[in-house]
Image: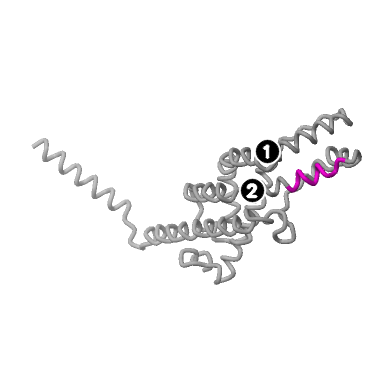
Amino acid sequence: MKKLRILFGMVALAAVMFTACKDDSGAYVEQLYTNTQLETAIKACLRTSADSAVNHLCVPDGYSSYNDSAYRIDYAGLESSLFDTLRNHDAGDLCDSLVMYTNRLAENCGGQLLPILKSAIDSLEIIDHQKLKSGDGAITHYFELFEYNTIKAAMQSPVSIRMNLFRVNETWTEMLLLYYLFSDIPLNFDIQNYIVDKMLEGIFEEMEIEEENIRTDPEHRTETTEPLAE
C-alpha cells in the first residue's frame, strides 16, 4: 500500500511539472531552434573570418604590405625615445631592422595562430544570440571580448620562439645597449607582449572586415552563415 501511495505521488508530481512546462504556442521550441541555428552561423562566421585574416596577414609581406601596409607592426611609442636617440647617433639601421624582423616574425605565425583561434571559437559561449545578429562587427567584438586573453596567452610561446629565430631579441638587445650609452632615461617596454598585441590587433580588424562581408555580400556566405543575413 505504501508503494502504491509513492507511485501515485510521483505520477501527480510529473503531471504538475508537465503542465508548468507545457507551451502550446510553440514559442519555446522555436526559440531553441533559432538560437541553435544562429549559434551555428555565428561560429561559422568566426571561422571564415579567422581563415581570411590569417590568409591575408600571416603570409610573406602580409603584415608589412597588405592593404597599403595598414597592419605593419612598428614601434610608434618608442619613436621619441629609443628610435630617435639611435638615429641621432647613426644607428637608425637597427630601428629599421627591428621593424622588419618583427613583421617577418608575425607573418610566420599563421600555423600556430589559426588553430588557437579556432579552438577559442569552438569553446566560445554565446549568451545573447539575437544581439550578435545586429551587425557593426558585433560577432568579432564579442569574440575578442571573451577570448582575447586566452588567445594572447596561447600565442606567447610561438612568438617567444620566433623572437630568437627572426633576430628580434638580438636586435632589441643591441639597441638597448646603444641607447643606454647615450641616455639615462629608463625604458619600460615589454616587447614580447607588444608584438603579440599588435599581431592580434591586425587579426581582429581583418576578422571584422570579413564579418561585414559575410553579412552584406552573398559571395562570402556559406549555408551555415545564412542566418546572419536575414
Q: Is residue 213 magenta?
A: no
Q: Residue at x 88, y 42 (%)?
A: 87
**Residue 14 higher or lower than 222, as above or below:** above
Q: Residue at x 52, y 56 (%)?
A: 47
Classify residue 90 as left or right of residue 32: right
- Type of the residue with mark 2: Leu
Taking depth in this image into account, of 66 and 168 the one nearest to the observer is 168
Residue at the disc numbered 2: 200
Residue 152 tag number: none
The quadrant where residue 77 appears: top right
Q: Of the residues tagged 2 and 1, which is closer to the observer?
A: 1
User: Counting residues from the N terminus, which is met first, the one under dot 2 or under dot 1?
Assistant: 1
In the picture, the quarter occupied by the N terminus is top left
Taking depth in this image into account, of 18 and 101 the one nearest to the observer is 101
Q: Residue 167: percent from the left, percent from the top?
A: 70, 40
**Residue 103 higher or lower than 182, as above or below:** below
Q: Residue 188: percent from the left, percent from the top?
A: 76, 32
Q: Residue 50: percent from the left, percent from the top?
A: 56, 55
Highlighted range, magenta: 91-100
Q: Residue furthest bottom?
A: 218
Q: Residue furthest top?
A: 184
Contact, mark 2 vs mark 1 (Cβ under 8 Å): no
Q: Residue furthest right?
A: 88
Residue at the disc numbered 1: 192
Cα separation, mark 2 vs mark 1, equals 13 Å
Q: Residue at x 64, y 48 (%)?
A: 200
Classify residue 89 as left or right of residue 45: right
Classify residue 59 as left or right of residue 65: left
Q: Secondary structure at mark 2?
A: helix
